[in-house]
Image: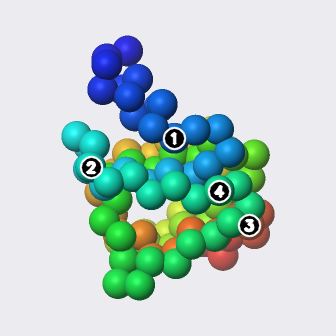
Amino acid sequence: MTAGAAQARLACPTGFVCFQETAAGGRIVRIAEGQGAYFAGGARVYEATNNTGLTYCVTSTPYDYALRPGQRVARDHTVYRAAPGTGCPF
């Protein structure tokens, strides 16, 4: 594991969903387990990490997705909404 990968994992503590702005770091948005968030105009995200026990439904462009517990997704997208839910409509 590289130092960068270790830092990315440490940046999202247990009990949070985290969105990181760029592959090199940048701003990190943390959402506490059980809470949701809406980003007016969208938030640019490179990496999404779910360190909670809940699945989160993420509305974004160019695609929507379910972010499962323990899952880490690294792809450039814009997030508009993230909320816990087991029945994501996508």
Q: Tell me the SS state at disc 3.
A: loop
Label 4 sits on residue: 32
Residues at marks 4 and 2, CA–CA distance in whole angstroms: 19 Å
Q: Where residue 4 sits in the image (x, y, percent)?
A: 30, 26
Label 1 sits on residue: 12
Q: Of the two numbered discs 1 and 2 on the same chain, state the one appearing first in sequence.
A: 1
Q: Of the two numbered discs 4 and 2 on the same chain, state the one appearing first in sequence.
A: 2
Q: Tell me the SS state at disc 1.
A: loop
Residues at marks 2 and 3, CA–CA distance in whole angstroms: 28 Å
Viewport quadrant of the C terminus: bottom right
Residues at marks 3 and 4, CA–CA distance in whole angstroms: 14 Å
| Mark 4 Cα-neighbour bin, 10 Å: few <14, some 14–19, many ≥20 | some
In the picture as drawn, the residue positioned furthest to the top comes out as 1
Q: Give the residue drawn at x 52%, y 78%.
A: 38
Answer whether residue 47 is visible to the viewer in this image: yes
Q: Tell me the SS state at disc 2.
A: strand
Residues at marks 1 and 2, CA–CA distance in whole angstroms: 13 Å
Label 3 sits on residue: 85
Label 2 sits on residue: 26
Q: Which mark is residue 40?
A: none
Q: Of the two numbered discs 3 and 4 on the same chain, state the one appearing first in sequence.
A: 4
Whether label 4 touches label 2, CB < 8 Å: no
Whether label 1 touches label 2, CB < 8 Å: no
Q: Give the residue drawn at x 51%, y 46%.
A: 49
Instruction: Check disc 3 and give the amino acid type.
Output: Gly
- The colour scheme used here is rainbow
Instruction: Check disc 1 and give the amino acid type.
Output: Cys
10 relative to 60, above or below: above
Instruction: Check disc 2 and give the amino acid type.
Output: Gly
